[in-house]
């Protein structure tokens, strides 16, 4: 049962339509400059600081809540109206229409395969699913098989921008590299080859990790594209992803500015 105070918060959330409520132009530009400066100054070739094996799982961000039914995040009692995916992958009205028209196809598939991936990585009981060809491709992916799990379905946020999101996995590979990853499902084998990397989206997650876990260093970012009986890993450098995220935020900020 959702109480009246919760309903009032949701009504207020729906009225939020300006980025100025979270970060002004000056702050947004400063954040972008900070990331660009960091890329030039120190790069991203370092590895994760050594931690005891029993303490390798990434700790959750305190005071960050996720409401699954609403697919909304709240940090320290304040709703975050924007999502990483919305900023990183803006869609035209035509594309959004096609997106909604095919939701009944891609949404249950995506939910089922993501749930299976999380269970696989966290040693939970694997759920039954009708998407066996997709889950088999997951199980055969070398990165998932041969790596130590540092986080799965990890929730993160940027309270300054009003953005929330969850990345699919953070792994330490068999070679010791720390890899941030996002899982994408597609409907055909040909789509596996055509799918573009989630560069800006990964950059958004990486930026949030930097804010809340400043001693955590990422060596590689991966988009894991999963189709029926086949998967493909697309690797990007972290600085590519951060740069793409800063660019995506700049565009989003301009398009949603109150003037």
Image (cartoon, rainbow, N blue to C red):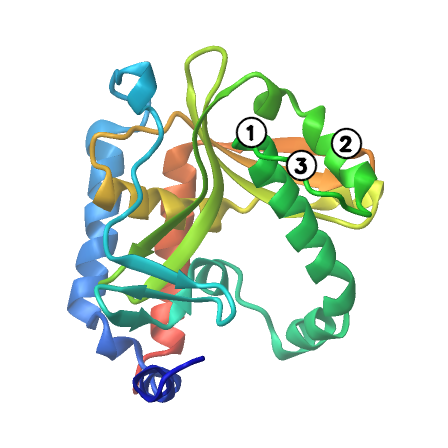
Q: Residue at x 35, y 73 (%)?
A: 254
Query: Is residue 103 rendered to the left or right of residue 235?
Result: right
Q: Nearer the viewer, residue 6 or 187?
A: 6
Residue 81 x, y percent position in the rendering: 37, 73
Residue topped by disc 1: 123
Residue topped by disc 3: 126
> Circles 1 and 2: CB distance less than 8 Å?
no
Secondary structure beneath label 2: helix
Q: Which mark is residue 136?
A: 2
Secondary structure beneath label 3: loop
Callout 3: few (<14), some (14-19), or many (20+) C-alpha neighbours within 10 Å? some
Label 2 or label 3, whichever lies nearer to me, is 3
Residue that lies at the very extreme toward the top in this rendered image: 175
Q: Residue at x 19, y 48 (%)?
A: 34
Residue 158 x, y percent position in the rendering: 28, 57
Q: How many numbered dots are placed on residues in this image? A: 3
Give whichever of discs 1 and 2 has the lower sequence position.
Answer: 1
Residue that lies at the very extreme toward the front in this rendered image: 1
For the C terminus, the quadrant is bottom left
**Residue 46 in view:** no
Q: Is residue 184 above or below residue 252?
A: above
Query: Is residue 212 rendered to the left or right of residue 182?
Result: left
Secondary structure beneath label 1: loop
Gap in angstroms between the C-alphas marked 3 and 1: 8 Å
Label 1 or label 2, whichever lies nearer to me, is 1
Give whichever of discs 2 and 3 has the lower sequence position.
Answer: 3
Q: Is residue 151 above or below residue 7?
A: above
Callout 1: few (<14), some (14-19), or many (20+) C-alpha neighbours within 10 Å? few
């Amino acid at each position: 049962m959702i109480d009246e105070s919760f309903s009032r918060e949701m009504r207020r959330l729906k009225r939020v339509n300006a980025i100025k409520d979270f970060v002004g132009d000056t702050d947004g530009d400063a954040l972008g400059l900070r990331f660009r400066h960091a890329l030039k100054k120190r790069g991203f070739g370092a590895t994760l600081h050594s931690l005891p094996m029993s303490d390798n799982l990434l700790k959750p961000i305190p005071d960050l809540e996720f409401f699954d039914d609403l697919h909304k995040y709240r940090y320290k009692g304040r709703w975050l109206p924007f999502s990483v995916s919305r900023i990183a992958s803006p869609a035209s009205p035509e594309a959004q229409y096609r997106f909604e028209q095919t939701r009944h196809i891609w949404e249950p598939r995506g939910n089922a395969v993501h749930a299976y991936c999380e269970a696989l990585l966290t040693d939970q009981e694997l759920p039954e699913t009708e998407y066996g060809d997709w889950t088999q491709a997951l199980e055969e992916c070398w990165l998932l098989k041969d790596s130590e799990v540092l986080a799965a379905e990890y929730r993160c946020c940027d309270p300054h921008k009003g953005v929330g999101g969850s990345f699919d996995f953070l792994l330490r590979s068999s070679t010791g590299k720390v890899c941030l990853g996002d899982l994408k499902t597609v409907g055909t084998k040909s789509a596996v080859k055509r799918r573009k990397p989630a560069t800006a989206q990964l950059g958004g997650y990486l930026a949030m990790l930097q804010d809340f876990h400043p001693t955590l260093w990422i060596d590689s970012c991966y988009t894991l594209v999963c189709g029926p009986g086949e998967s493909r890993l697309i690797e990007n450098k972290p600085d590519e992803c951060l740069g793409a995220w800063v660019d995506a935020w700049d565009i989003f900020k301009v398009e949603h500015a109150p003037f």
